[in-house]
């Protein structure tokens, strides 16, 4: 997981992360913080293991920590967070110890995690993103725009 530390310690990551935290101060709904990034990463890795996919753990975690990193730009400039996130992640990954194939996988997951028609890995990653939400204990549950059937009413992972 040493390579993941490269990402989380990168000045561009730190700046984008702070921008998200500043924008979400006082937010009642789900946050895009380290807790969310860890939950997505852990659930995604469990799903990868269950499906016996050949993807390294730190590649999944890199995608987990980068998948919402564009949220700050979305809040500030209206840029879709996947688009902004790919730009931020590309800059960080270009200097990282991840190889070209791993970088491509990470960027694919960022770009496709919200599309249900994506490849199997992207589909699982998107599922992990949704499953990571603690709807059971959410204080803003009644105001949430997610339809009731989409909310996580039981813990699966």
Image (cartoon, grey):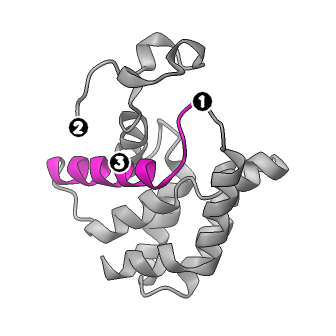
Q: Main secondary structure of the magenta part?
A: helix
Q: Quadrant of the N terminus?
A: bottom left
- Residue range highlighted in magenta: 28-50
* Residue holding disc 2: 157
Q: Secondary structure at mark 3?
A: helix
Task: Give left or right: position of 15 versus 3.
Answer: right
Q: Quadrant of the C terminus?
A: top left
Q: Nearer the viewer, residue 7 or 99?
A: 7
* Residue holding disc 1: 28
- What's the mark number on residue 20? none
Mark-to-mark CA distance, 2 and 1: 23 Å
Q: Residue 149 lies in what quarter of the image?
A: top left
* Residue holding disc 3: 39
Sort mark 3 into few (<14), some (14-19) or many (20+) by Cα contacts within 10 Å: many
Mark-to-mark CA distance, 2 and 3: 9 Å
Mark-to-mark CA distance, 3 and 1: 19 Å
């Amino acid at each position: 997981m040493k390579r993941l530390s490269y990402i989380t310690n990168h000045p561009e990551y730190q700046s984008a992360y702070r921008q998200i935290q500043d924008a979400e101060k006082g937010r009642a709904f789900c946050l895009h913080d380290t807790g969310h990034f860890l939950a997505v990463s852990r659930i995604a890795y469990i799903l990868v293991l269950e499906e016996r996919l050949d993807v390294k753990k730190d590649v999944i975690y890199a995608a987990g920590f980068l998948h919402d990193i564009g949220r700050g730009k979305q809040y500030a400039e209206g840029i879709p967070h996947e688009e902004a996130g790919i730009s931020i992640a590309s800059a960080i990954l270009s200097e990282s110890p991840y190889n070209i194939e791993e970088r491509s996988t990470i960027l694919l997951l960022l770009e496709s995690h919200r599309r249900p028609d994506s490849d199997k890995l992207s589909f699982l990653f998107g599922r992990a993103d949704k499953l990571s939400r603690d709807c059971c204990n959410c204080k803003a549950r009644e105001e949430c725009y997610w339809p009731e059937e989409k909310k996580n009413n039981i813990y699966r992972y």
